[in-house]
Amino acid sequence: MTQSVFFFGDGAAEGTRDMKAVLGGKGANLAEMTNLGAPVPPGFTIACAECISYLKDGKYTDRLRAQVEGNLARLEKSTGKKLGDPKNPLLVSVRSGAAFSMPGMMETILNLGLNDRTVVGLERASKNSRFAYDSYRRFIQMYGDVVLEVPSQKFEQVLSSKKLLEGVEEDTDLGEDALRNLVEEYKQLVKRVTGAPFPTDPVVQLWGAIEAVWRSWTLKKARDYRRVNRIPEDLGTAVNVVSMVFGNLGNDSGTGVAFTRDPSTGERKFYGEFLVNAQGEDVVAGTRTPLAIDQMAERLPEAYKELLTVQDRLERHYKDMQDLEFTVERGKLYLLQTRGGKRTAAAAVRIASEMVAEGLIDKTEAVGRVPAAELEQLLHPIIDPSVSAKPLCVGLPASPGAASGIAVFDPDSAEDRFAAGENVILVREETTPEDFHGIVAARAVLTSRGGMTSHAAVVARGMGKCAIVGCKAIEVDLDHRRFAVNGTEIEEGDWLTLDGGTGRVFAGNLPTVPSEIVRVTNGTLRADEAPLYQSYHQLLGWADEVRRLKVRANADTPRDARTARGFGAEGIGLCRTEHMFFEGDRIQAMREMIVARDESGRRRALAKLLPMQRADFEGIFEAMHGYPVTIRLLDPPLHEFLPHGGEESKLLARTLGIPRAELSRIIEDLRETNPMLGHRGCRLGVSFPEITEMQGRAIFEAAVRASRRGIDVRPEIMVPLVSTAREFEHQHAILEEAASQVLGAMGEKINYLIGTMIELPRAALMAGEIAKSAEFFSFGTNDLTQTTYGLSRDDAGRFLPSYVEHGIFPEDPFQVLDPDGVGRLIRIAVEEGRATRPKIKLGICGEHGGEPRSVALCHEIGLDYVSCSPYRVPIARLAAAHAALADKPRSLA
């Protein structure tokens, strides 16, 4: 017969910590602590699989009932008490416990087994009438809420009235008679709401509680938690039935929660809280103000001394920071739970580093301990946690960090007010490349439309700026320069604070706390003055020893490139040249080129742009001394560089010396129904080869100038949006001619590569042909995802969350690289590209390059590098190490 119930007690258990899939985390750890000889009250655990069976069939089996009855008898023998015995009653707690920790997401019931007869037995055994009836009223309230679905606030209303009547403020001040009366009032409430009396049979109570715990697996909060933390739905929860120990027996009893290290900072000190004369829910619920754990040394000295010994023993056994729940009953300590403690990213890094120094774990284990995605917490400022404020609304947390500034509604105002020394938040319905200078000037970006890989999101992440996008609650009124949200209006000039880590938008100027890591990286803080940085730097150094994938950055300016190097980038995987055209007077020259009537006019305008581009490239080569720099040729359609009417069009026509009607005609001629699939990328270079020629010359001239200054330059020129080998060959020939002319005239030799961006399904399928002339492929996974799914990344945010919620898509494919569709196209391109050119260089440069699961997929496929925003480089470095360890576990010396 399949064993579904597992006993622990009397110094031995039928399980171990390795049985989490069967017993859940709590059950497995109760068994482990029992086997270690820790003071754990006896009990038994019902396996997780029984939960799924119950939820599927709507009932439990006779086999399970028999096993529970057998283990209950064993528990009664172990404790010397009996469930329902009016003289010496056994009382139990019934708790959930899934394989993955889900704190607070499922149900717990304490003091089960009490009724009008057993409460008398508890009163006699404890010699404490007040305690007995306090336990009884707690049980009715908890059981009534969890099992009988009587709203908790109804019990609270009765309790509040009782305290008011008795003239007391705290529950603990209610006397025995008041608690006796409260029990009766609670029972009357249950009958009034449910139409049935409160159940008095302890066995009926037990099965009611077990079923309620199983049902709590389907609670919305539990489902949401699993979705956010990517916990599978089909695991179910175990049920732990444990003999009660009481912290509310008087001043020699208490309860608490503790961590073997500080979960916020990682400091190696015992950290926690406790309450005297209380039960566990009192600490968690916050109904009473707890005491710091070190005060337990004065109030319960012997129990505290034992707790210090046990916590140290458990941490050394588990080799990780532990989260403990304990109760002291009349001076005797009991452990009710241990688990790996939840911790901040700062704490995770420090604990991992220090545990290596202490000899508890090795470097490989330390690298694996820190979730890569959580490193982002360390790289951006945060809102000062001591500040309490209510958000105006919540959008998509596109780029972490926190920033405050005055609201502005167009990029020119952002630039002007920034130049005047003001901090600004750029508020737009959505952004385009034309807004780039406004994004540069802004502290943060807020949009009402767009998704996690929209323009605002991508650019802001690349610059390390806070951004919240797709905030549907705000209604942007550009005409009146304001937005409305939930009855509040924010005018231009009003202060806003954005929390890009959570997507919350606040009115006002809230203070922020700068990141220690960033201050060291940018040179405003010495590394030896930053202990967190030292742990962080050490951990990533260990990660670098393990990983195979190289990590580059997407960077468009010398400043971005220097930031990327500070974060450990090993080159630039994507330099978007179009962003350079929006700075200063360059936009004017670019517009001159676009409206030119013939090639000679375009060449005159391009001649103005060439030295500007050359200077930018030279600065980037200098910042990336010794590392490759992949420069993407002009990609967006030309209409994005032109105004779309109004005074700006009138001014431009006057500046260019052409009739406004002609300018309007040019703009209209450039307008496209679907510009993403229109005249852009290499198609522009085919139509206007002089653009490709100018950019090629700027790159090679910059490379020569930098090389002459002793800089090790390694340019890689990338042709975007290729779908056929002929397109690439056309652009390749122009670039080779530019190289020949520049390098020949300047008498220099520069090693360079010319490759392409694979961002269309046809390009992936034709990779073998394209690789005959392309020396590298960089997968542009943002556009490749768009064109594979037929989705607009800017518009799909309106419905993609619903797709994910209903299980149609497992993840948002713009956030996590799709392994089955997009991933298959990448595999095809990799295989066919390498078949043609075995040493072809392969990487990705979409935003997926900084997402840990996507990095793991890139490792599995066999790419050479990933490239991501500078502020995601540390995440990619650690994720690449995790992928390597999962592939081939190894130990670092």
Image: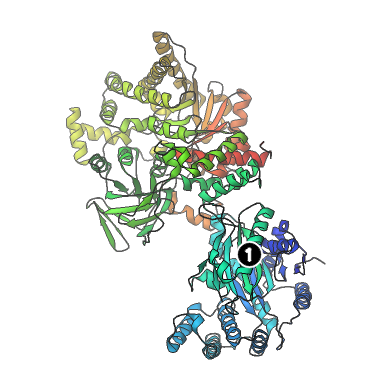
Q: Is residue 563 above or below residue 405?
A: above
Amino acid identity at mark 1? Lys
Quadrant of the image occupied by residue 112: bottom right
Image coords of residue 646 (percent x, y): 20, 41
The residue carrying mark 1 is: 305
In this rendering, would 205 be left or right of 617? right
Scheme of colours in the image: rainbow
Q: Quadrant of residue 548?
A: top right
Closer to the camera, 530 or 871?
530
Q: Position of residue 120 (x, y in %)?
A: 65, 89
On screen, residue 851 versus residue 653, left or right, reads right
Q: Is residue 271 left or right of residue 7?
A: left
Residue at the farthest right position: 1
Q: Position of residue 366 (x, y in %)?
A: 61, 44
Q: Residue at x 19, y 32 (%)?
A: 653
43 to the left or right of 522: right
Tell me, yes or no, if residue 510 can be seen here: yes
User: Could you tell me which secondary element the residue under label 1 belongs to?
Assistant: helix
- Residue drawn at (41%, 44%), measured in percent from left and top? 457
